[in-house]
Image (spheres, rainbow, N blue to C red):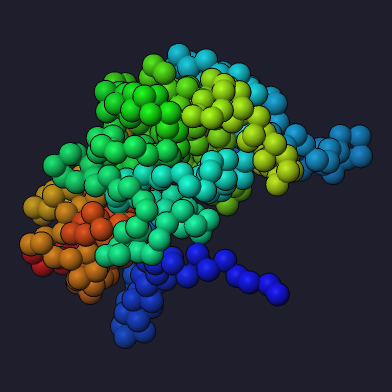
Amino acid sequence: MARINANYDKLTAGYLFPEIARRAAEFTDANPGVQIMRLGIGDTTEPLTAIVSGGLHAAVDRLSNSDTYSGYGEGEGNESLRQALADRYAERGVQLNASEIFISDGAKSDSANIQSLFSNDAVICVQDPAYPVYVDTNVIVGRTADAVDGQYEGLVYLPCTEANGFVPEPPSERVDLIYLCNPNNPTGAVATKAQLQAFVSYARENKAVIIFDAAYSAYITDPDLPRSIYELDGAAECVIELNSFSKDNGFTGLRLGWTIVPKALVTEDAAAGKVNTMWRRRQNTFFNGPANIVQEGALAALSPEGRRQSAEMVAYYKVNAKTIRDCLQSIGLTVFGGVNAPFLWMKTPDGMDSWAFFDKLLTETHVVGTPGSGFGPSGEGYFRLSAFGHEPDIARAVQSIRENLKL
């Protein structure tokens, strides 16, 4: 007799975006003709760059010709693409072998799948607030008990607060896996080298592994801030880094990312090379590699001209972030992030709870954002806004906030 995985019943965070959609739809129904402006999306909005589009079309043409057709690719991804990524890391002083880089259908998928390499009794540590996939996937596999007051028993939470600049210190107790997102979603905070080095030192001392999500690293323009955790001494021994083509190349609809599993990585019960071999086996068992067409688009994006065009896309969104940040500060609100990250983390006025501010912003300005409490208990009293959007839409939204929000 088949039985379901009852861990799904423990999940609590899935209500966030459906609840946002419900409240927005309810407002629209009650106010016909009113146009809602969205500053809450985490999805890119600008079209693919010309060089990426050309790479995709060329790949389609090759697949349409019997002489150049190709079927299954390598489960780890196109070797030339992996080498191009290794070359890009080398520019920042990070030496990687192409065999340590695995191309996938996205960083989100990898952040969920990578934890299958570790024992079910592993103690998991997450930032709070956090991107929900880190927590939810560990709930699904049974590493937690039920949620109590928004936190799952069995997980170790590191509060990210205004007092610590939304970058916590390493845990005080022994943990096995640590999820870090940098630049952070949702807070927009970016850790310094010293702050990340503290986590690397902790992981090496305790034979822990850091799952480091660097999906927004292209938004770091401050030269003193690391774009990869492998810029720090010893990180290759204890860190798996995830990244994505989505946020700097607009691949959210194409789906492509990569994961780095260094051969130097060790755990309490696995010598160097073992985890890399396990991930290779996992990918070739569950996955036949990303689409050939999409990988050709990524190769085009990594060319010198492709990188120039991608940098223009990032700069476009960073201008949006500055527009939003300047608006919020001009009306007396406290806002963080939005400088080396595409997300802004706003303190709600007068201690208002996150959902109450959501309703106020929607009612008074017709702007939709994301309540911070949806990312974890430490997000209560904060609100996430996103720089992803068309510039004219961003301009209309901030004008409405400036003119209509009653503070």
Let me know if residue 164 appears in the view.
Answer: yes
Q: Quadrant of the N terminus?
A: bottom right
Is 361 above or below relative to 341? below
Give x and y (percent) for residue 316: 38, 41
Looking at the image, can residue 370 be seen?
no
On the image, the x and y values in percent for residue 310 come to 49, 34
Residue at 48% from the left image edge and 32% from the top image edge: 241
Coordinates of residue 297 in the picture (x, y in percent): 64, 37
Say which of 387 and 156 sits in front: 156
Front-most of residues 318 and 287: 287
**Residue at 29% of width from left, 38% of height from top?**
173
Horizontal arrangement in the rendering, residue 203 relative to residue 347 (left or right): right
In the picture, the quarter occupied by the C terminus is bottom left
Q: Nearer the viewer, residue 11 or 366?
A: 11
> Which residue is drawn at the image coordinates 18% and 66% (left, top)?
353
Displayed quadrant of residue 102:
top right
Is 152 left or right of 1, judged from the image as shown? left
